[in-house]
Amino acid sequence: MKKRILVTGAGGFIGSHLVKFLVEKGYWVRGVDIKRPEFWKTKAHDFKLLDLRQWKNCLKATKGIDEVYNLAANMGGIGFITNIKAEVMRDNVLINTHMLEASHQNKIKKFFFSSSACVYATYKQNSPDVPGLKEEDAYPADPDNEYGWEKLFTERLCKNYYLEYGLETRVARFHNIFGPYGTYEGGREKSPAAICRKVATVRNSGSVDIWGDGKQTRSYCYIDDCMEGFYRLMQSDFRDPLNIGSDRMVSINKLADIIIGISGKEITKTYDMDKPQGVRGRNSENTLSKKVLNWEPSISLEEGLKITYAWIIKQVK
Ligand SMILES: NC(=O)c1ccc[n+]([C@@H]2O[C@H](COP(=O)([O-])OP(=O)(O)OC[C@H]3O[C@@H](n4cnc5c(N)ncnc54)[C@H](O)[C@@H]3O)[C@@H](O)[C@H]2O)c1
């Protein structure tokens, strides 16, 4: 019989791609979210609109399910998570705690949790040319924002649901996942989508504003690569948190230059030093994920941005 999978956050960016990916692999998929996907029709066999901060909804969502991919979260890019703190911590702790307990009570066989590179210690990310972050670099703990503290808490909750109740849990730390069919405006968008939108909407020889001095660094992983990585993690026996990201670190200036190059426009950059920019440097170190998953991202930043920019320019038109 086909495995029955629950994807929470199925109305969001990664969740809506994951539903499609799993349906194409032949699974029966239930999607749950507080909203339907904004940019395409869900491919889920069953889609329920449920608020997973509420316990009874988590029980309903996990009923008759074999495996859970728990992606639902109240989150956004650096602007959003810098400003919204109590709401993010409260909502996500409620969602994740209820989802783990409901999965335990409904005898779910495997539970996936989408953690984040935001768990890593701030003191390891103080300059633009930092070494890649290994999984062990999350401790001693010092995440740079409250969203990271909540993710760290849930990582530990996953571990303890395995140790106390035998619930098999898998945890990926995503590093800046990007691609089409994701939020690109409204305040929750992340840097690749935000810069694509700015470049797509500015006239030739205009300018785009960059948050901070643009020298801060990050790594970016295209959605299809990410999905293959965490699907492999779900199939593996590996119970500790694992990086899912690219290990090619670029500055925000470089990211913007690539997007400007793709657009074919003559655009200059201006700098807004009052905007939040997060840690100074961040990259993924992939030795462990290569070993455990026999996987590393294969789609270049340039290729991924080309697809993303083409999709965003269509939306803004
Ligand atoms: N995109 C990234 O670069 C990235 C990086 C690190 C971690 N993550 C994690 O991956 C997961 C998916 O991220 P995404 O980029 O697709 O974000 P997203 O915002 O597009 O998707 C999250 C979804 O969760 C839903 N949600 C929020 N509150 C809910 C509630 N109370 N009940 C039910 N659904 C609710 C939202 O409506 C949204 O559709 C999240 O857990 C996020 O923290 C993403």
Image: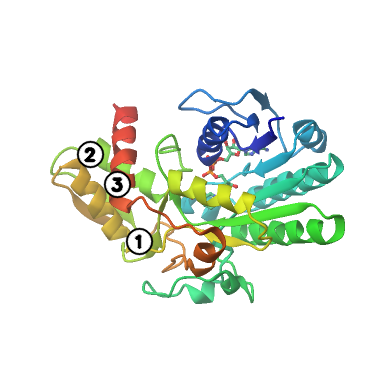
Mark 1 and mark 2: span between their CA atoms?
Answer: 20 Å
Name the quadrant containing residue 172: bottom right
Q: Quadrant of the C terminus?
A: top left
* Front residue (pair 39, 150): 39
Task: Residue type at mark 3: give it.
Answer: Glu
Task: Residue type at mark 1: give it.
Answer: Gly
* Front residue (pair 85, 73): 73
Seen at 39% across and 59% down, the residue is: 274
Q: Which element is circle 3 on? A: helix
Instruction: Mark 1 and mark 3 in contact? Answer it, CB < 8 Å.
Output: no
Task: Residue type at mark 2: give it.
Answer: Val
Q: How is the image coloured?
A: rainbow
Asked if residue 43 is positioned above or below residue 138 in the image, the reply reads above
Left or right: 247, with 301 as reference point? right
Label 3: few (<14), some or many (≥20) within 10 Å?
few
* Image location (x, y in percent) of residue 105: 86, 42
Asked if residue 252 is positioned above or below residue 139 in the image, the reply reads above
The residue indicated by pointer 1 is 212
Q: Earlier in the sequence, mark 2 or mark 3?
A: 2
Q: Nearer the viewer, mark 1 or mark 3?
A: 3
Q: Earlier in the sequence, mark 1 or mark 2?
A: 2
Q: Which element is circle 1 on? A: loop
Asked if residue 142 is positioned above or below residue 295 in the image, the reply reads below
* Image location (x, y in percent) of residue 69: 65, 43
